[in-house]
Image: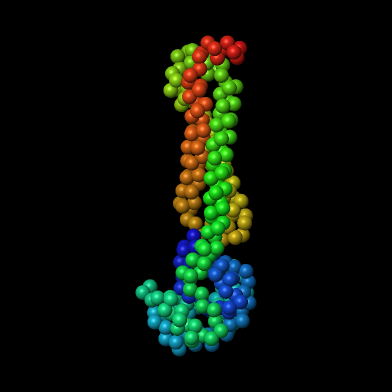
Amino acid sequence: MLDEGLGDLGGDIVLALPKDRPLVERWLATGSTEPIEARIDAAMWQRWVEEAQILGLREIEPVDLTQGAAGVPASAKASLLVLRLEFWASPMMAEVEIETAVPGAAVVVGEQATRHVLTDLQPLVRHLSRAAGVAVLGAILISGLLTSIRVGQRRAELGMLRAMGATRSFLIRLTVGESVVLAVAGGLLGSLLAVGVLWLLPGARALLRYLPVVQLLGLVGIAVVGTGLASALAALGPAIQTARLDPLDAVRRHR
């Protein structure tokens, strides 16, 4: 998502005042940010950059972010300057030249900003991964427990099916299938609810905008399929116990 956001902005290098650097990195990563006061003399900075004769420089765009969000083109005063290079030019080499040509400017290279944001997110991702693993394990245990309770309550019914000629494989498929259907419905509802909650959060909504619909649907599909497989695994034990029922004993105990 960060790479796609950076590509949509089309900025290879951003020039800003040093105190605004964190907000600029956020703007590069998500496409929007909090308001940044327009204190840069756009014409003077642009002239300094042009006089540096940076190899591969294609375009300079002053941006006004006094209202935050994605910003608008600036005129006399700008919040930052976006520099676009030719595809063959090196932003790292241009960074050195710009630091010399534009005194007092913070030079933010798009690739570096993206890596910086990813580095900050890594601890959060690790903690969320552990939490997700614990949640999956808990869901499997709870699903198996609920399946066992459901099998116990329907013991007489399943015994009657067995007495009427139902095979053991049919009873296993029936028990596992019921659990999978319920799990898939719950997984789909939970995934849609999660997307809706994330959309209500301003920061998450800014990132979701850069996630293609096909990719988002793919993630929901993975969550639903994973939920179904986990439920099938949890229901397998009770299903095997169901297949071993003695028909007469099941009916006699649950008249």
Whether residue 209 is visible to the viewer of this picture, yes or no, is no
Residue furthest out toward the left: 88
Is 39 or 63 nearer to us in this picture?
39
Q: Quadrant of the C terminus?
A: top right
Instruction: Identify which residue is drawn at 57% across, 74% down.
Output: 21
Instruction: Identify which residue is drawn at 47% across, 63% down.
Output: 4
Q: Tell whether 185 sits left or right of 84.
A: right
Instruction: Identify which residue is drawn at 52% across, 16% down.
Output: 159
Residue 195 in the image, given as x and y percentages of width and height: 57, 50
Total marks placed: 0
Residue 83 in the image, given as x and y percentages of width and height: 47, 77
Identify the coloring: rainbow
Q: Tell whether 199 sits left or right of 60.
A: right
Residue 193 in the image, given as x and y percentages of width and height: 59, 46
- Position of 115 relative to 51 (above/below): above
Residue 212 in the image, given as x and y percentages of width and height: 47, 56
- Position of 78 relative to 117 (above/below): below
Quarter occupied by residue 84: bottom left
Instruction: Identify which residue is drawn at 58% across, 10% down.
Output: 252
Whether residue 45 is visible to the viewer of this picture, yes or no, is yes
- Position of 93 relative to 143 (above/below): below
Is 206 or 133 nearer to us in this picture?
133
Quarter occupied by residue 204: bottom right
